[in-house]
Amino acid sequence: MMIYKFFFNMINDEAEKMDDDFESNYLNLINRYLLFLFFLFLFYSVFIIIFFGDAIISTFLTVTTFFWLLLILVKGKTKRFRNMLKFSIIFVFVLLTFIVSFFHIYTSKNAGVEYFYFSLLFAIPFYLHYKKDKATIFFLAFIISINFIVSLYFDFDFLPRSRFFEIEDYKTVKLLNILFSVASFLMDIVFIAQKDELINGLIKNTKIKDSTIEDLVKTNTELMKHQMLINHLSEENIQEIFSLAENNSPMFFEKFQIFFPNFIPDILKINSNLIHSELYFCALMKLDFDTKKIAQCTNNSIRAVESKKYRIRKKLNIASEININSFLLKI
C-alpha cells in the first residue's frame, strides 16, 4: 500500500509539473502573439505617417502599440487573471473591430482596411475554445460581421475623414493592406496550430497519467492479495496453493479450505444454495485469478467461465459495478 501511495504521489507531482509546463508554454505563446500585435500596430503607425501624414492617428496607434508591449510584461497573466481573461479577450476583440471600422470609414472605404475583419475572425480560435466558448465565439463573429456589413453600406458622415489621403495612393495603400491582412491571417494560422499542438500534448500526457494510475491500482490490488496470503500462509504454502490451482489438482479445494477455513462458510452464509463447482470458482477468484486463467485451470471455455461467474454474482447479490474478485478478496 505504501508503494502504491509513493508512486501515486509521484505521478501527481509529475502531473502538476506537466500542468505547469503547459501554462508556461501557453504563456510564452500568448506573449509571442502579443509581440506580433506590437509589431503589427507599430508597422501601421509608421504606415499612417508615410502614406497619410496624419500625426494624430499615428500617435493613437503608437499608444495602442505599447499597450501590447505592456501586456507582455505582465507575469503569469494566464493564472493571475484567469477569471478576467475571457472578459478581457471579448473587450479587446470588440475594440479592435471598431478600430478597423473607424479606419475603413476614415480612409473613405478605399484603402482595403476591411480585409482586417477577416484577420480578426481567424484570430478568435487562438484565444477561445470552439466547444466551451461557443456563445462567445458566435457573439464576436456577429459583432465583426455586423461591423463589416454596416461599414460597407452606410456612409457615417459624422465620422472624420483623412485630410492627407491622395487619390493616386489608393491602389498602393489597398495593395499593402491586402498583403498585410493576408500575412496576419497566415500568422493566425501558425499560432492556432501551435496552440493545438500544446493542447494535444497536454491531452496525451493526461491519458498517459490516467493509464499509469490504472496500472498502479491493479498493482496495488495484487499487492493486497499477496499481503493477505502472506499474513496467513508461509511462502511454501503460497506456492503450493497456486500450483494446485493452476494444475487443476483434486487436492486444491481441500487444501484451500485448510488454508482459508472461514471463507467457504462465510460464502454459504450469504447464499447456502451455491453448488460445489460454484464454490470452487469462488476459491479461484479468492486467489484473484481472472477469467482467462480460470478457464485454463478448469479446462473450460472463457464463455463458460463468464456464465458461471454471472450466476455466482447473482446468487451473492453482487452489484454489476463491483469487481467480483475484489468482493471475494474482502471475505
Image (cartoon, grey):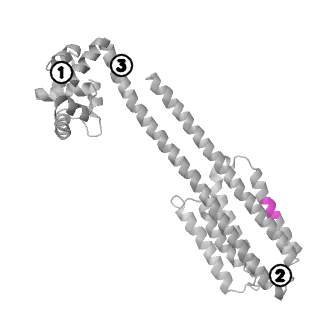
Q: Is residue 167 above or below residue 81?
A: below
The foreground one among 328 and 270 is: 328
Please rate how many residues cluster around mark 2, counting C-alpha atoms within 10 Å: few if below 14, some from 14 to 19, many from 20.
some
The residue beneath circle 2 is 162
Magenta stretch: residue 217 in it? no
Mark closer to the observer (3, 1) = 3
Residue 232 image point, x, y percent: 30, 13
Side of 85 relative to 324 (left or right) = right
The residue beneath circle 3 is 227
Side of 189 relative to 157 (left or right) = left
Residue at the (18%, 36%) spot, across then down: 305
- In magenta, the rendered stretch is 63-67
| Residue 102 in view here | no
The quadrant in which the N terminus is found is top left
Q: Which quadrant of the view contains residue 153?
A: bottom right
Residue 290 image point, x, y percent: 27, 32
The foreground one among 116 and 175 is: 175
Residue at the (31%, 17%) spot, across then down: 229
